[in-house]
Amino acid sequence: MLALLLTWGAMIILCGSLWYVLGIRKRRQGEPPLENGMLPYIGCALQFGANPLKFLRERQKKHGLTFTCQLAGKYVHFLTDPFSYNAVMQQGRNLDWKKFHFATSAKAFGHASIDPSDGFTTENMHHTIIRTLQGNALTFLSETMMENLHYVMVESSAEKMNLNDWVTDKLFEFCYRVMFESGFLTLFGTEFNTHHDKVLSSSQQDQRTRILSALENFKEFDQIFPALVAGLPIHLFKNAYSAREKLAEALLHENLKKRENISELISLRMYLNDTLSTFDDMDKAKTHLAILWASQANTIPATFWSSFYLIRNPSAMKAVTKEAERVLKDAGEKICSSRKPICLNQKQLDDMPILDSIIKEALRLSSASMTVRVAKKDFILQLSSDSYHIRKDDIIAVYPPLLHLDPEIYPDPLTFKFDRYLGENGEEKTFYRNGHKLKYYFMPFGTGLAKCPGRWFAINEIKQFLTFLLFYFEVELIDENVKCPSLDQSRAGLGILQPSNDIDFRYRLKLP
């Protein structure tokens, strides 16, 4: 924290000396209302970072639906009218999402640029990700995740627990452990000569120890991830730098080749890295680290929030348990005394509208992703009611919490309502604002071409976790009246916000 404050101080002093040389940006005719902020270069960044939702609501009230703020040297045009979002998505000729994401990835994970135009690779890795997270590849990935979840969550727990004994734990920590280990095994496979047996062998124990060590390194690195995205060098954070390097070393190709059952996503990336790039070994490993982070950093807190709201809400628990039991019966599966793994295919996972609604509602209340586009050139942005002049390299941004917490769209928006997304006959509900139907009303995964390609897999993971929680365990909060944790705003703009504090809960195996 001290290093962070010193860095901000140095930036302010440096930029202050340049302030009068460079001048401040002046609003031109036809441009949105502009706020440069009080601090040189920093602009409105500190106010925005402290509470983005409050900041944007205040500016919306002051300036209207579209306005510009200087944030750390960048000029960001915020669009707050959901009926204007489509106009942005149709501006592919003038707006680019790739450069921002490519630059952010290289900055945070430390690999060379993955932008083909920079000459290190001839392949757009984004297309590779999409191809391996859809169709049959998604089916296989989800089935593998279900097997690993059963191994980590059920078999390993059963081995350590006695029947009828309650185990007390921290809910976020529990979700973190289970989802990280299961997800790691699903993406990167298992070490040779380790198998999911009932009794853990020494090789399995060793593998688990290494994964849990990777988990601690992941936490250390993830903690300072927002600072890296903001542009601070990782060398300011000695422990996080060490953690990132250790994670990357574990994902070197020479180490991955010692594993079996690696996912198609990773095996294809290994092939493309080896054949179509000039990356060195560490660069290749760090592109895999980017995938590891993308697969875990939002899914884990999303699993926590879905679990917390479900356990806390008896009506939700009753409704979704009934739904899950119906799906299990229709699938011809049943929970037996041996706790044999169950398998739900994609169709069966999709046939759970109540669980869908619970997860969506949890994401609505906890997501703070930001959809970002960068102007390729000067152009005029035509919105539903106005048009604005946009300068080259300016940023167009949409902040979905403004939408998700709008009382005109979601009455009583801060309250968890497990059936909020269910229509009268169980179909997905339609949402309106000012009497007009909304195309965009739920955006935790972004939108347009930049929409998270792993969203279907992430939802499947959370569904699998929750169904196992329902099928195999009795769970309850230690304090039934515990307050909902506040959201950690330090990750605003990056996805699902983490809880500011953990929640005590307990669980035990259900009697067969």
Image (tube, grey):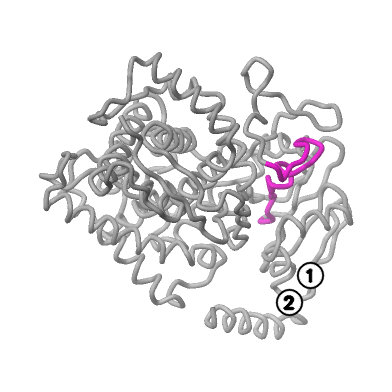
- Which residue is denoted by mark 2 in the rendering? 40
Badge 1: few (under 14), some or many (20 or more) residues near its Cα, within 10 Å? some
Residue 332 vertical position relative to residue 236 in the rendered view, above or below? above
| Residue 224 horizontal/vertical position (percent) | 49, 67
* Residue 231 occupies quadrant: bottom right
- Which residue is denoted by mark 1 in the rendering? 37
Name the kind of residue labelled 2 in the image. Pro
| Residue 465 horizontal/vertical position (percent) | 41, 38
Q: Quadrant of the C terminus?
A: top left
For the residue pair 25 and 60, the one nearer the viewer reads as: 60
For the residue pair 226 and 13, the one nearer the viewer reads as: 226
Residue 225 vertical position relative to residue 431 in the rendered view, above or below? below
* Residue 47 occupies quadrant: bottom right
Q: Are marks 1 and 2 in contact (CB under 8 Å)?
A: no
Residue that appears at 80% across and 40% down: 407
Badge 2: few (under 14), some or many (20 or more) residues near its Cα, within 10 Å? many
Q: Which residues are magenta?
A: 393-415
| Residue 510 horizontal/vertical position (percent) | 35, 35
Name the kind of residue labelled 1 in the image. Gly
